[in-house]
Image (cartoon, rainbow, N blue to C red):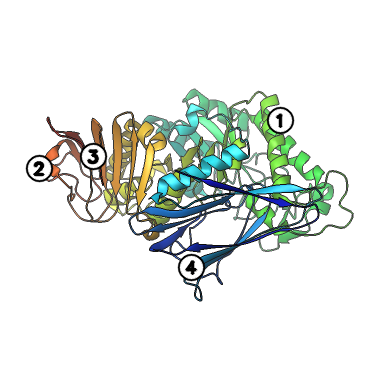
Amino acid sequence: MPVTITDHAVAAHDSFDLELEFPLGAGVGLWTPEARGHRTLPPDWANRTTTSLVQSAPVVVLHDAEGIGLWGLACSEVVGEISIRGGVSEEHKSVRLSLHAAAESGDRVVRLATTDAPAPLAEVIGELSAWLGEVNQITALPLPRAATEPVFSTWYTYTQDVNHDNVVAEGRMAAELGCRSLFVDDGWQVGGHGRGYGRCGEWIPDTDKFPDLRATVDELRSLEIDTVLWIAPLLLGMDSPVVSQLGQYAPKGDERNRMWILDPRHGPVREFVASTCARIVTDYGVAGLKIDFLNNAMVYAGEVVDNPGEGFVADVGEAMRMMLGQVRSRLADAGLAEPIIEFRQPYVSPAITAYGNCIRVGDCPADAVVNRQGSLDLRLFVREVAVHADPLMWARDGGAVAVAQQFQSTFFSVPQVSMPLATLDDEQRKTLAHQLRLWRDWREVALFGRLSVQGSELGYTQARAVHDRRAVVAVWRPELVDLTDLDVDEVLVLNGSTVDGLLLRDVDDWEPVSCWGPSGVPTESDAPAPAFGTVVLRPRPGRASRQRP
């Protein structure tokens, strides 16, 4: 697809300001990397965001109701702060955008990439994402195999009430289900209780919960489970002894949660974060870190600091790039060259892949729709990483459908199971085992296949991934599923809707070979895929693929 590149020279001490106008055409939605709240067409007077390394990315794509990207825009400034304002103009019946970046001390060139040839939404987003990676010369953090394996997460399971006994017990059951890593979330650290952050900054274990954290990690490793620890290194608890050391670098905070927010623009803060992350890995032998709440640093965007001191960097995004680069180097020096590093929305820029290899959907407990939107947004945009769903939780009285609904909505991302496994009844336990087994069988296609989508403005109604002559197709509404252009040997179809059966175009071209209900119970092949069920299809002899016009 043709991409037009324009360069905008910006002199030292001048801000970058640009007004743009694009045709509205038959557009129904403006896709952005962090479109969680508004997926259709915002008015130009109500849509404003500031992007940086830890806040979305400067990318906008207009698409129509058929899932065709009509035009797309990307700005090379994925690290530094850039303000984007705009949407549909009432007066002009067009899409108008304004871009602004603050002045810098030296001359610079801001580059824009635009597309105006209609193409499938996934292709437009992918082309712009690839360009951002190239123009910024991003070298992705290596992706260990463990990052693409199912995860057990402690967060929705226990929130902060984690301890050695329940972590090891869950790890043992999770290993039997095929999970290969366990993310110990908030609560392992001293003061981690009551949803408060008053002691953040020490980052040492609560010995009442974990008398010997390294022994816990070793026991999980004996089960072939890697451990990842949660840390929010920019949160500084108001009751932490570290306040005396770093309090001067944390002028903003949250009294209700008893915490300050460290400003990463200061050199001592960056050094503290890097050394702390390396210490945790070294002391406890974990396989990686879930580094959280980095986007909180955006409260310092544009803030002027008097007498900032040596090592101060004015731009939050640039400061975060330096800080995370130090973290990556220190972990490598500590012997962890290929760590599992998880970040979560909204830091989803291609530039963030240099420092994290698991990008996770932002918190949406039990919300299968938002989890679906977030995981597909990430799969479309962020390359060379493992996209992880928000941890999956459900009601224990919801039966098999409650479990299957969560898995089918997030099938194109790594599942993180977050339920107390021993409390599940036989039906939900059987469903969970089936869904994990199914996902593992189709993992390579789901995670790394060529992705296409429909219905972004509706939270996605269909998606498909194709890889190595296999395909996964998911449909979340009772609508036509067109497989005529698929030239594959096998396709898994997920019926994520509430209606039994599938409406397949040219159904006689395909032969169902395996059909399951939500819990994995086989069903009749002549009426494949009940609601929240699945079917594997193979082409009948003599079938010819017919490309869509």
Measuring 72% from the left and 46% from the top, which residue is drawn there? Answer: 318
Task: Give the CA distance from mark 1 to mark 4.
Answer: 49 Å
Q: Is residue 391 visible?
A: no
Q: Amino acid type of disc 1?
A: Arg
Q: Name the residue under label 3.
A: 520
SS for callout 4: strand
Q: Name the residue under label 2.
A: 526
Q: Contact (CB < 8 A) between labels 1 and 4? A: no
Mark on residue 94?
A: 4
Task: Give the CA distance from mark 4 to mark 3.
Answer: 49 Å
Viewer-side label of 1, 4: 4
Q: Mark 1 points at which residue?
A: 330
Q: Amino acid type of disc 2?
A: Asp
Q: State the residue in front, 489 or 118.
A: 118
Q: In this view, does 524 lie to the left or right of 114?
A: left
Viewer-side label of 4, 3: 4
Q: Can residue 548 be seen in this view?
A: yes
